[in-house]
Amino acid sequence: MKIVSVKAYLQQLPLTKPYTIAYKTISDTEIVFLEILLENGIMGIGASNPFEDVVGETPAQTLLNLQSDFVQNLAGKDIRQFNQLIDDTAKYFPHLPGTLAAVDIALHDAFCQWLQIPLVDFYGRKTDVLPTSVTIGIKATAEMIEEAKANYAAGFRVLKIKTGLNVDEDIERVTKLTEQFGNNMRIRVDANQGYTLDQLQKFIKQTKALNIELIEQPLPVGKEQGLTLLSIDEKKLLTADESLLDAATAMQLAQKPIPFGIFNIKLMKCGGIKGAMQIANIAKHAGINLFWGCNDESMASISAALHAAYACSNTKYLDLDGSFDLSRDLVEGGFVIKDGYMYCSVLPGLGLKKIN
């Protein structure tokens, strides 16, 4: 089955509400879409939103790459060779995960539609349905509690809060949230590289009784070895995000002494589903659990991450709320949310429908 055309375009989408992390405030997002059309009318849809601060690639660069002759020359190729086409793209665009992710996702979607099976069934489902966390940016404690109440009313029972600017205020926030919700809301924190080792140890010690589920990327990239000084139980809480980009960094972080007990896999860091599965396999053999995260993304790439997550036996956590706060999207479908739990579409491929 031949590919007959390839189309890439960029959309700037405002967020419904800006949010603050340890080093910036974000109010909109740029998403690059890729459409791969087969001769029988099947359209595979990919989407990409690389985070320049983490991977060094901007959406504008992604768009130019996807409009290059190399990608446009996918037209005429056979979709049954999708795996080789992903490898060829990775070789042509090394260290450009945003570009690779768009191609990878669109090819997977088109191929699994051609097979007439959901993408998760192609790899084989290994994990049952899980709840996703919803994220609250850095803000005053009272505002954070009000937003958490709204999320609770909407059916979500896992909360991730951004931290990393002031450890004492962070301790106060998680304490107040625990007082508000008790055991009815699980709490995760994301320091976005904002702590020193001493601050992290202070946070862990003073929140130990609060049953924090995990702590994401507490120290700056390059300072990971400091984490090996912590106890085994403490390290089990720690999640590698910015420190983990691809299979190569996964291999480094899987060497003993292992600094993180959890890997945060984002398709925008590792270049799509194939790269994600490579990281997942490394983590499995090292006894590391998986946490699937995202940027501010379209339902297209969020759906791809969800299918990949459920195809891995060591998936324990989802943080796939990246499409919730978009003012609009260009696709619909892909997954269903029910009481905070994420369900893959049962339609072929990613189960997406383009919004006209």
Image (cartoon, rainbow, N blue to C red):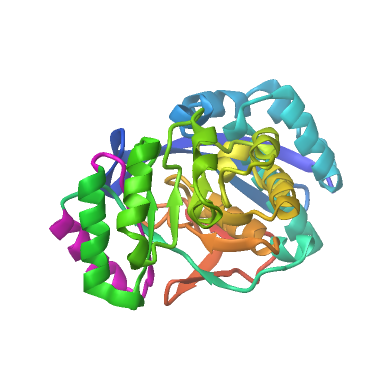
Give whichever of 158, 201 is nearer the camera. Answer: 201
Taking the image as shown, residue 336 lies to the left or right of residue 275, namely left
Q: Is residue 73 above or below residue 177?
A: above
Q: Would you say residue 188 is visible in this rendering?
A: yes
Where residue 6 sits, quadrant-wise, is: top right
Residue 303 on the magenta segment: no
Could you tell me residue 187's position as x and y percent? 37, 63
Asked which quadrant contains residue 288, the reply is: bottom right
Q: Could you say which quadrant of the image residue 244 lies in?
A: top right
In-image side of 131 versus 206 (left or right):
right
Q: Residue 297 location in percent, x, y?
A: 46, 47
The residue at 69%/53% (across/down) is 109
Between 244 and 63, the one lying in front of the other is 244
Total numbered badges shown on the rendered structure? 0
**Range shown magenta:** 141-166
Q: What residue is shown at x 25% (from left), y 54% (from top)?
A: 171
In the rendered view, would you say 285 is above or below 183?
above
